[in-house]
Image (cartoon, rainbow, N blue to C red):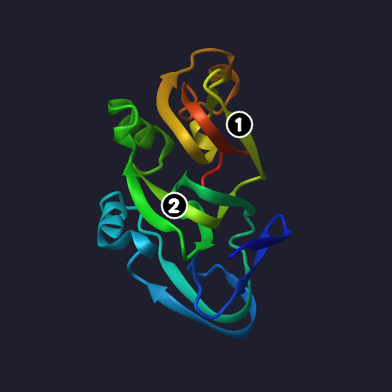
């Protein structure tokens, strides 16, 4: 169920019988046709364990199940929206950044400590992001929110990418992450809120970086 970008802050989704999508509650701006919106407590196809994982991490983001026949406009808080199209791979994104996603995608959670050990846990504390990250896998579209627009930066084995943790939005592919210290000019000219750390991503894939250090 592809999303069409109306502009940088709005997307349109086509809803068809027998298909469904999930959206963050309050993200519906307008719709045409016979479309229903139902509160969802199961967290997509990840089931109960996915829901428990986010609640343990205090990351439960209320979702709506969207079904019927018609078109729906989505947006939230004037945030910029980036559509990520998955072709069988997995995207990792903080739960509160999810605007909407295809109902065919399998949803789960990943404990950040499992990538980078203790440093993965430190990342959650330093950035203010939870220790659990939402995962979406399969074939379909995911719409994520960010401040100031988003750029996709490729990650290759020969060229890892270092990202300010506050500017990180999401990543996909076979990617490993770890937190490293970054003592240098960035610490003296930046805001000083966790900028002594960098998130290093290596492997094959891409990372989405926002043009801001603001949280949603």
Mark 2 falls on what kind of element? strand
Q: Residue at x 41, y 49 (%)?
A: 135
Instruction: Measure the C-alpha gap from mark 1 to mark 2.
Output: 19 Å
The residue identified by callout 1 is 154
Which disc, if any, is residue 134?
none
Most distant residue in the right direction? 7
Note whether 12 is above or below 31 in the view shown.
above
x, y percentage for residue 150? 64, 43
x, y percentage for residue 123? 38, 32
- Left or right side of 197 for 75: right
Q: Is residue 146 visible?
A: yes
| Image quarter hosting the N terminus | bottom right
Q: Nearer the viewer, residue 71 or 186?
A: 71
The residue identified by callout 2 is 136
Badge 1: few (under 14), some or many (20 or more) residues near its Cα, within 10 Å? some
Looking at the rendering, which quadrant does residue 70 occupy? bottom right
Most distant residue in the top direction? 184
Note whether 72 is above or below 68 in the view shown.
above
Disc 1 vs disc 2: Cβ atoms closer than 8 Å? no
Q: Residue at x 39, y 64 (%)?
A: 44
Note whether 203 is above or below 75 in the view shown.
above
x, y percentage for residue 33? 63, 85
Q: Residue at x 44, y 51 (%)?
A: 137
Mark 1 falls on what kind of element? strand
């Amino acid at each position: 169920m592809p999303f069409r970008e109306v502009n940088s802050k709005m997307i349109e989704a086509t809803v068809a019988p027998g298909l469904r999508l999930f959206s963050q509650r309050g993200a519906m701006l307008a719709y045409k046709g016979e479309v229903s919106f139902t509160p969802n407590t199961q967290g997509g196809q990840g089931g109960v364990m996915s829901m428990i994982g986010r609640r343990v991490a205090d990351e439960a983001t209320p979702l709506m199940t969207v079904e019927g026949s018609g078109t729906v406009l989505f947006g939230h808080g004037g945030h910029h929206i980036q559509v990520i199209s998955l072709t069988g791979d997995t995207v990792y994104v903080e739960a509160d950044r999810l605007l909407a996603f295809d109902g065919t995608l399998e949803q789960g959670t990943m404990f950040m400590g499992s990538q980078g050990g203790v440093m993965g846990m430190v990342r959650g504390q330093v950035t203010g992001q939870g220790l659990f990250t939402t995962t979406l896998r399969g074939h379909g579209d995911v719409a994520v929110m960010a401040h100031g627009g988003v750029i996709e930066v490729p990650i290759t084995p020969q060229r890892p990418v270092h990202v300010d943790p506050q500017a990180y939005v999401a990543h996909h592919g076979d990617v490993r992450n770890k937190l490293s210290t970054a003592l240098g000019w960035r610490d003296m000219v930046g805001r000083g809120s966790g900028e002594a750390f960098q998130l290093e991503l290596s492997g094959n894939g891409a990372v989405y970086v926002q043009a801001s250090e603001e949280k949603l």
